[in-house]
Image: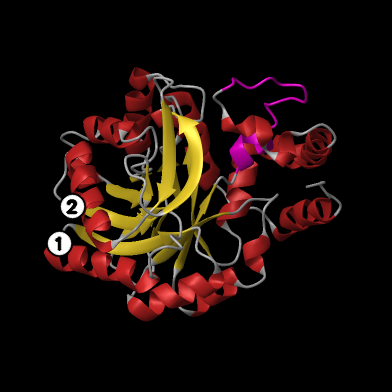
Amino acid sequence: MEHRQLGQSEIQLSSITFGAWAIGGWMWGGADKRDAVAAIHKAVDVGMTSIDTAAIYGQGHSESIVGEALEGRRHEVEILTKFGLRWDTDRGQHYFDSTDNQGRPISIHRYAGKASVIEECENSLKRLRTDYIDLYQHHRPDPTTPIEETMEALGILLEQGKIRTAGVSNYSLDETKQALAALPIVCNQVPYSMLERDIEDDLAPYCQEHRISILAYSPLQRGILTGKIKPGHVFADTDHRSDQYYFQPGNHEKVMDFLAEIQPIADQRGITLSQLVINWTLHRPGITIALAGARDPRQVEENAGAADFRLSPNETEQIDTALEQLVLER
């Protein structure tokens, strides 16, 4: 699989990076640990060597699974994780309330004070069973802490060798500028897909100009762009997708009509819709890598296959033309 440079660092990430939110179970209706470990093993085997997780995913559970799965294989991979969404403190800004994997109530706070960032890193290192993290990202901006303070903490971790590079996630253009002024960040991980393209207007061009990688998460838009989730699907009570606008009646049908329009491109190539969608994402201006989640080895293999081809200009134009006609209600 192709690997691409992370910002201006020496690190190369697999163009399709394994997204480990779902394997943490939380907000995805649960997950099978054995399947998750097998999925990570398969990812590394097929060249998908970059694994992205976060402390908040399953409240440490995802990181623990990643650490277990990579035991003895640390030298083969790049570990990406995130901090700044805490469930074990009431400091910072209250973000939302939820329940953990055991059904217990938890309250999520955005908090990235200096001491907290350093503490979170130590906890993540233990769960991941490693002594360094390849990319450490601030998960979401914390309005109660100056960005400069958060970047200072990352600078300390860089000096200590506990992280190799520092990045941000879900930062706006202005926030990205503030972060870059304080520390040479290498990336901004943001949502980007056929259905969510706002960054094309300002953030993507800025990041390209300043050689900041864009790590595109949810390229399959929580699964709707696979075409496998049909209108009327009932999600589990603990699955966050039930409230997403694109799954609502009317919008869901429009997305399915769009997918039917581009299905012939996939059929002609002998690929799945998921592979077509991920490949389109990989070759958009400014996109360095696409994160794709998987809960079992079969899903990993399908995702990895998205890197095996390049769409022709005509195919890309067909997709873009169809997208121009797709208008969803928010």
Q: Amino acid at mark 1?
A: Gly
Per the image, is 181 magenta? Answer: no
Query: Mark 2 touching mark 1, by CB under 8 A?
Result: yes
Residue 161: x percent and y percent?
14, 61
Identity of the residue furthest to the front in this view: 90
Type of the residue with mark 2: Tyr
The secondary structure type at the circle numbered 1 is loop
Q: CA distance from mark 2 to mark 1?
A: 7 Å
- Residue at 41 percent across and 23 percent down: it is 104
Q: In which quarter of the view is residue 220 placed? A: top right
Query: Disc count in the image?
Result: 2
> Residue 184, located in which quarter of the rendered image?
bottom left
Is 180 on the left-hand or right-hand side of 124?
right
Which one is in front, 299 or 306?
A: 299
Where is residue 297? Give x, y as percent.
42, 26
Mark 1 is surrounded, within 10 Å at the Cα level, by few (under 14), some (14 to 19) or many (20 or more) other residues, namely some
Identify the residue shown where x is 49% and y is 32%: 98
Q: Earlier in the sequence, mark 2 or mark 1?
A: 2
Q: Which residue was labeled with disc 1?
A: 161
Q: What residue is shown with label 2?
A: 132
**Residue 286, x across and y down, in percent:** 55, 67
Q: Position of residue 112 (x, y in %)?
A: 34, 58
In what element is the residue under mark 2? loop
Colouring rule applied to residues:
secondary structure
What's the residue at 70%, 31% (across, down)?
A: 227
Q: Which residues are drawn in magenta?
A: 220-237
Apparent side of residue 227 relative to residue 103 in the rendered image (left or right): right
Rate crowding at label 2 as few (under 14), some (14 to 19) or many (20 or more) other CA atoms within 10 Å: many
